Image: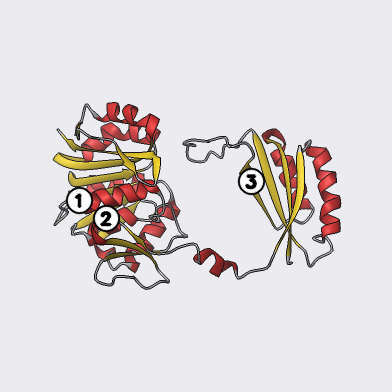
């Protein structure tokens, strides 16, 4: 046994105090979890909303005096009283090779039409398939989430030969990279997170398509478009969230050609109609415009054609 974990449940109003007390007592890290199965949808950039009831877990080094079970147990009662905790408990964690433990959770994924997503430390099961080599640890979009899979499946069904594609909300760059491997000529990837831009560039290089993929922050992309004749494009994919998708509808209409194809994802079932309504002034949605992920009936995508 190398680590002791102290778990305590309290109201969100007391979380800051609980975190400070745990760190002051020598916690090496603190994790926050939902105590009541309360969903939190679509925080704005920079926001970190909390659940009404939160479980904090402080990790202590059990080989030190401060991290011994006796010391952590005494600490738990002291902190619990100050933050009005409703539950407290301890657990032990064995020491492991955490890097290998993390890597063991990932495996190659077969998508539609012989497209595979392969973690970069593994050998592709089918070398002759279209293989996307990914680092799953850098940004959203590893292929394990239903919305990413929906977009990948849609891309495999399109004729992307010599097409120019925008991947808006690119995350890891997986959709733009897939488009290039499926025949696209050029991809412009955009994300509000600088880490996503970095991840996209690294994954593009890993898949030997970095010469045909350019990644930008939104302001950088707007400046680039103003200085270069890159618009309109043939295809747009956006796997983000309902609120930004709704607000971006008029802007997306300026990015694509008449009769261009789009796919929108990151929606829960109850949001589909609102997003569809925002795009109907600009795009003709497919008759069956809602597509549901087989592995999770909650997630949906929309696709359509720009009408100009």
Quadrant in the rendering for residue 18: top right
Q: Is residue 168 above or below residue 283?
A: below
User: Relative to the observer, which residue lies in front, 294 or 255?
Assistant: 294
Quadrant in the rendering for residue 99: bottom right
Please identify the quadrant where the C terminus is shown. top left
Quadrant in the rendering for residue 142: bottom left
Q: Is residue 42 above or below residue 64?
A: above
User: Relative to the observer, which residue lies in front, 165 or 64?
Assistant: 64
Q: Residues within 10 Å of mark 3 (few under 14, many from 20)?
A: some
Please identify the quadrant where the N terminus is shown. bottom right
Report if the CB atoms under discs 2 and 1 are less than 8 Å apart: yes
- Please tell me whether mark 2 sits on a helix, a strand or a loop: helix
Look at mark 1 in the image and give the residue it sits on: 157
Tell me if 188 is positioned left or right of 106 in this view. left
Q: Residues within 10 Å of mark 1 (few under 14, many from 20)?
A: few
Look at mark 2 in the image and give the residue it sits on: 112
x and y, in percent, of residue 93 in the image:
70, 61
Query: CA–CA distance between discs 3 and 1?
Result: 40 Å
User: Relative to the observer, which residue lies in front, 221 or 2?
Assistant: 2
Q: Is residue 51 above or below residue 214?
A: above
Q: In this orientation, does residue 191 appear?
A: no
In front of the other: label 3 or label 1? 1
Look at mark 3 in the image and give the residue it sits on: 32
Q: Is residue 266 above or below residue 178?
A: above
- Please tell me whether mark 1 sits on a helix, a strand or a loop: loop
x and y, in percent, of residue 7 in the image:
72, 48
- Taking the spot 77% from the left edge, 64% from the top edge, the residue there is 62
Give the number of the disc on residue 14: none
Q: Earlier in the sequence, mark 2 or mark 1?
A: 2
Query: CA–CA distance between discs 2 and 1?
Result: 8 Å
- Please tell me whether mark 3 sits on a helix, a strand or a loop: strand
Q: Residues within 10 Å of mark 2 (few under 14, many from 20)?
A: some
């Amino acid at each position: 046994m190398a680590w002791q974990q102290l778990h305590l449940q309290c109201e969100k109003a007391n979380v800051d105090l609980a975190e400070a007390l745990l760190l002051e007592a020598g916690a090496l890290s603190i994790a926050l979890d939902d105590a009541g199965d309360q969903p939190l949808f679509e925080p704005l950039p920079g926001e970190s909303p909390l659940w009404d009831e939160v479980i904090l877990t402080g990790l202590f080094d059990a080989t030190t005096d401060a991290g011994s079970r006796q010391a952590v147990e005494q600490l738990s009662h002291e902190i619990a009283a100050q933050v009005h905790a409703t539950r407290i408990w301890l657990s032990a964690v064995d020491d492991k090779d955490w890097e290998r433990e993390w890597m063991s959770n990932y495996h190659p994924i077969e998508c539609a039409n012989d497209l595979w997503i392969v973690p970069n430390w593994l050998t592709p099961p089918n070398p002759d398939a279209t293989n996307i080599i990914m680092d799953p640890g850098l940004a959203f979009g590893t292929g394990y989430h239903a919305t990413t899979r929906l977009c990948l499946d849609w891309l495999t069904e399109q004729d992307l030969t010599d097409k120019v594609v925008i991947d808006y909300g690119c995350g890891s760059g997986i959709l733009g990279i897939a488009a290039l491997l499926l025949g696209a000529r050029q991809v412009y990837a955009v994300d509000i997170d600088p880490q996503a831009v970095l991840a996209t560039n690294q994954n593009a290089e890993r898949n030997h398509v970095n010469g045909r993929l350019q990644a930008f922050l939104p302001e950088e992309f707007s400046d680039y478009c103003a200085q270069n004749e890159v618009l309109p494009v043939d295809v747009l994919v956006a796997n983000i969230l309902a609120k930004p998708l709704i607000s971006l509808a008029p802007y997306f209409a300026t990015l694509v050609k008449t009769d261009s194809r789009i796919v929108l994802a990151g929606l829960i079932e109850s949001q589909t109609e609102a997003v569809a309504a925002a795009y109907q002034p600009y795009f003709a949605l497919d008759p069956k415009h809602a597509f549901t992920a087989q592995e999770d009936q909650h997630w949906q995508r929309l696709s359509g054609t720009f009408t100009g």
